[in-house]
Image (tube, rainbow, N blue to C red):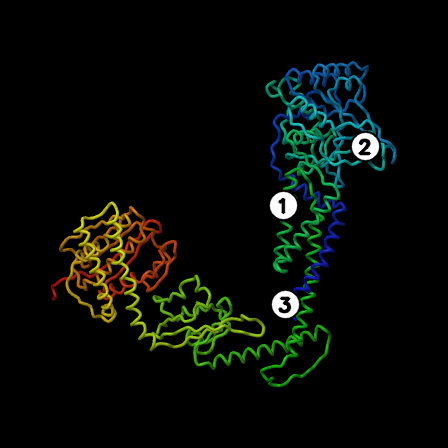
């Protein structure tokens, strides 16, 4: 049974669970999980950071006002005085969250309040709905007194809807007896503000829900959630008595929308709300202020209808199952956590947009699918595993067993599976040992690596080579070979990525170890019956003798092919310049061209003498490093002119810098540095060559303003044929710098590089100064 069969069986379970999970989620979404949804809603609404509208001002019947005016309820004359005071201050509107249902005395005070309201023309008062006397009885509505109702700018109900936990989160914008439905008092106020152009208009929001407690005579609809802006006390407020006594300036009241209501703790008009927190409850007038604020800002939270809620609740579960299928049943835990987080984020975003999507059904559907999937998938995998073990035990064993098989079959199904597993493991161990013995018998160093170049097995010669007899399994082949090669001569295929990241491109590559032995890498794919690409067999063939002879010939040819380009490039630069506006006089042009042609001819002879550098056959004599620098500058001048780069020299005099060396190789070494500086510098930059003597050392420096070299490339800069990052160095082989390093070694000198990316590089040649005291 293959893994594809296992996947098909898991896919069948996936499809079955898809139907179960979606059906269960839809059923859960059709139910109300008040406590869970309410806890999520309360937390999200408490995190709201929307500001309050400063145009809304609460005039509070607080403890301070009760001390100043007296016990509640107050005379309608007091309220009349407040209305007159607010009218004189120029408020936009006044909403009285106070019931005026019963006459006071002979009615004179009620008339005075009605007259004050008439003068103001912008006072809104509530009506009341009495509780039902018996279940099924029609509710009774109590309007304000006639003197007050006739002079009110608007009348509305102030009812709120408490959930099962006792908290107020919702209310109906329309409510009343059939045929006499009245708006919420806050909506009546908002509607008047819209008509006066003081607020942007909007259609009455909210879900329509008709009938209450099976009483068809009572109608209410447009259910909305109050968009709370903060905890109790978030809206600006002033004390009732302070306004009445003139302690509040007119400037503070002018143009404001005033809501008058009780906030004192003993007056009873307080409710638990999602944002009340440790403060316990919020006054009813403050709930109206939050609702009015939302209406004025165009932000009121509405609820989804049942069908939409069910469909949306299925989306996270469906998305999780699709993601699981796309990932081929991987990352179950991560996908589950991600989908829970996305569900909560979607819920928060919808609330931010004014839509409440209860997430409880989706979360429970996700958990249900997660548990069912863990159960069913593990059951399928266990059954597949048992079948594979039984199949393995029935296959012929290539390695004979030492004691034979007992063939015992006893115990439950689980016990038999354990015994089959034990037999299969023993067979696999014996087979692995057989393969290991075969590898150890091979006459060459051999590694078995997987597709990621990680060593799966190595023979005895390979373990001896890397100096780890215990084994190199789980090592990267690159790391294993890096322990063998010299630290200062790491081959390209080990030190660079690119195409060499794949070991198949190592075929034919050669390297030498710390003991001077040369190896050629042979790469062969490992084909098995299970998979076409099981890994690679890497063999290291000892080519020490042949390699050393070939390197002597190839080294000279590589230098020849590299440095021959320089004089030819100079000749091309002279020809281009001669055809341009900066043409030289004919005599000077021909002289320079002749020098470059002769330089090219001489270069052939110089490269044929490269073997002298390696074997010490150099023509040493006293030379001046200043003269060497001048010759190198003369060679580099056409290249610099063609690129628009200025060459500058410093401290180059006729008797500066005596050293003991081979002038031809030294000139070529300095020229190589100048050529590189020009090649990697932008036009209109400066390349500087300086020579100075400091004590018993003579120093030559080449500085440029080019692209620079990355710090991690500098340690490998002087290796032959080194290829660097294309962002820092142009493509090409580092033969020039390798030649410079070889020349410096033969002259007992040192070469150093200091570079900053995008600022430039400085190469320093440090020679021992020549003195004729002992000669």
Residue 416 lies, with reference to residue 717, above or below; the image says: below
- The crowding category of the residue bearing disc 3, from other C-alpha atoms within 10 Å (few below 14, some 14 to 19, many at least 20), is few
Q: Secondary structure at mark 1?
A: helix
- N-terminal of the pair, mark 3 or mark 1, is 3
The percent coordinates of residue 470 (x first, y second) are: 47, 75
- N-terminal of the pair, mark 2 or mark 1, is 2
Q: Nearer the viewer, mark 3 or mark 2?
A: 3
**Does 417 sit left or right of 251 as displayed?**
right
Q: Secondary structure at mark 2?
A: strand
Residue 3's label in the rendered image is 3
| Residue 420 vs residue 527, the one in the foreground | 527
* Location of mark 1 (residue): 345
- N-terminal of the pair, mark 3 or mark 2, is 3
**Who's the residue at 72% across and 73% down the image?**
413
Q: Secondary structure at mark 3?
A: helix
Q: Nearer the viewer, mark 3 or mark 1?
A: 3
> Can residue 66 be seen here?
no
Residue 156 lies, with reference to residue 747, above or below; the image says: above
Residue 11 location, quadrant: bottom right
Label 2–label 1 contact, CB within 8 A: no
Residue 219's label in the rendered image is 2
């Amino acid at each position: 049974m293959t893994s594809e069969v296992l996947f098909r069986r898991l896919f069948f379970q996936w499809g079955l669970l898809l139907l179960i999970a979606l059906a269960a989620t839809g059923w859960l979404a059709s139910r109300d999980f008040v406590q869970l949804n309410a806890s999520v809603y309360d937390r999200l609404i408490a995190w709201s950071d929307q500001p309050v509208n400063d145009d809304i001002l609460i005039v509070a019947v607080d403890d301070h006002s009760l001390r100043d005016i007296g016990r509640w309820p107050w005379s309608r004359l007091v309220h009349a005085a407040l209305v007159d005071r607010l009218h004189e201050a120029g408020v936009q509107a006044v909403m009285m969250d106070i019931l005026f249902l019963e006459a006071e005395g002979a009615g004179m005070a009620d008339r005075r309040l009605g007259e004050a309201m008439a003068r103001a023309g912008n006072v809104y008062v509530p009506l009341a709905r009495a509780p039902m006397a018996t279940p099924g009885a029609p509710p009774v509505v109590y309007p304000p007194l006639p003197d007050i109702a006739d002079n009110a700018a608007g009348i509305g109900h102030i009812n709120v809807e408490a959930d099962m936990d006792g908290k107020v989160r919702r209310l109906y914008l329309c409510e009343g007896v059939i045929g006499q439905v009245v708006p919420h008092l806050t909506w009546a106020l908002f509607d008047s503000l819209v008509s006066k152009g003081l607020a942007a208009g909007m259609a009455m929001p909210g879900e329509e829900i008709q009938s209450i407690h099976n009483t068809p005579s009572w109608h209410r609809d447009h259910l909305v959630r109050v968009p709370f802006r903060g905890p109790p006390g978030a809206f600006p407020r002033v004390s009732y008595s302070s306004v009445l006594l003139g302690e509040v300036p007119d400037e503070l009241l002018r143009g404001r929308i005033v809501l008058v209501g009780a906030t004192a703790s003993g007056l009873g008009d307080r409710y638990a709300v999602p944002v009340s927190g440790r403060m316990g409850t919020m006054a009813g007038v403050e709930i109206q202020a939050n609702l009015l604020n939302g209406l004025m800002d165009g932000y009121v939270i509405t609820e989804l209808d049942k069908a939409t809620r069910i469909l949306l609740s299925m989306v996270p579960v469906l998305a999780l199952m699709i993601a699981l299928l796309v990932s081929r049943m991987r990352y179950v835990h991560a996908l589950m956590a991600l989908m829970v987080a996305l569900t909560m984020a979607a819920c928060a975003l919808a609330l931010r947009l004014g839509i409440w999507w209860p997430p409880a059904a989706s979360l429970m559907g996700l958990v249900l699918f997660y548990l069912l999937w863990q159960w069913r998938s593990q059951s399928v995998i266990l059954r597949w595993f048992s079948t594979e073990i039984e199949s393995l035990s029935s296959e012929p064993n290539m390695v004979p067993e030492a004691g034979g098989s007992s063939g015992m079959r006893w115990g439950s199904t689980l016990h038999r599976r354990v015994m089959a597993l034990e037999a299969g493991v023993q067979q696999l161990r014996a087979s692995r040992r057989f393969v290991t013995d075969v590898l150890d018998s091979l006459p060459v160093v051999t590694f078995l690596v997987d597709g990621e170049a990680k060593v799966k097995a190595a023979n005895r010669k390979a373990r001896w080579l890397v100096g780890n007899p215990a084994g190199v399994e789980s090592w990267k082949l690159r790391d294993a070979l890096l322990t063998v090669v010299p630290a200062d001569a790491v081959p390209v295929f080990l030190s660079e990525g690119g195409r060499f990241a794949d070991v198949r491109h190592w075929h034919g590559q050669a390297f030498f170890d710390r003991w001077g032995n040369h190896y050629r890498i042979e790469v062969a794919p490992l084909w098995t019956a299970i998979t076409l690409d099981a890994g690679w067999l890497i063999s290291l063939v000892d080519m020490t003798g042949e390699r050393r002879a070939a390197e002597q010939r190839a080294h000279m040819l590589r230098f020849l092919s590299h440095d021959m380009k320089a004089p030819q490039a100079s000749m091309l630069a002279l020809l281009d310049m001669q055809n341009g506006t900066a043409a030289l006089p004919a005599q000077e042009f021909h002289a320079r061209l002749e020098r470059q042609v002769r330089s090219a001819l001489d270069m052939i002879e110089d490269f044929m003498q490269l073997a002298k550098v390696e074997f010490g056959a150099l023509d040493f004599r006293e030379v001046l490093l200043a003269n060497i620098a001048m010759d190198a500058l003369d060679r580099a001048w056409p290249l610099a002119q063609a690129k628009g780069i200025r060459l500058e020299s410093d401290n180059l005099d006729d008797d500066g810098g005596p050293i003991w060396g081979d002038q031809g190789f030294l000139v070529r070494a300095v020229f190589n540095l100048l050529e590189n500086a020009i090649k990697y510098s932008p036009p209109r930059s400066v390349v500087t060559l300086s020579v100075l003597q400091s004590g018993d050392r003579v120093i030559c420096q080449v500085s440029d303003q080019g692209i620079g070299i990355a710090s991690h490339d500098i340690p490998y800069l002087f290796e032959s044929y080194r290829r660097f990052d294309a962002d820092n160095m142009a493509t090409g082989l580092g033969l020039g710098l390798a030649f410079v390093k070889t020349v410096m070694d033969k002259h007992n000198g040192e070469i150093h590089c200091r570079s900053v990316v995008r600022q430039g590089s400085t190469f320093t040649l440090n020679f021992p100064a020549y003195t004729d005291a002992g000669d």
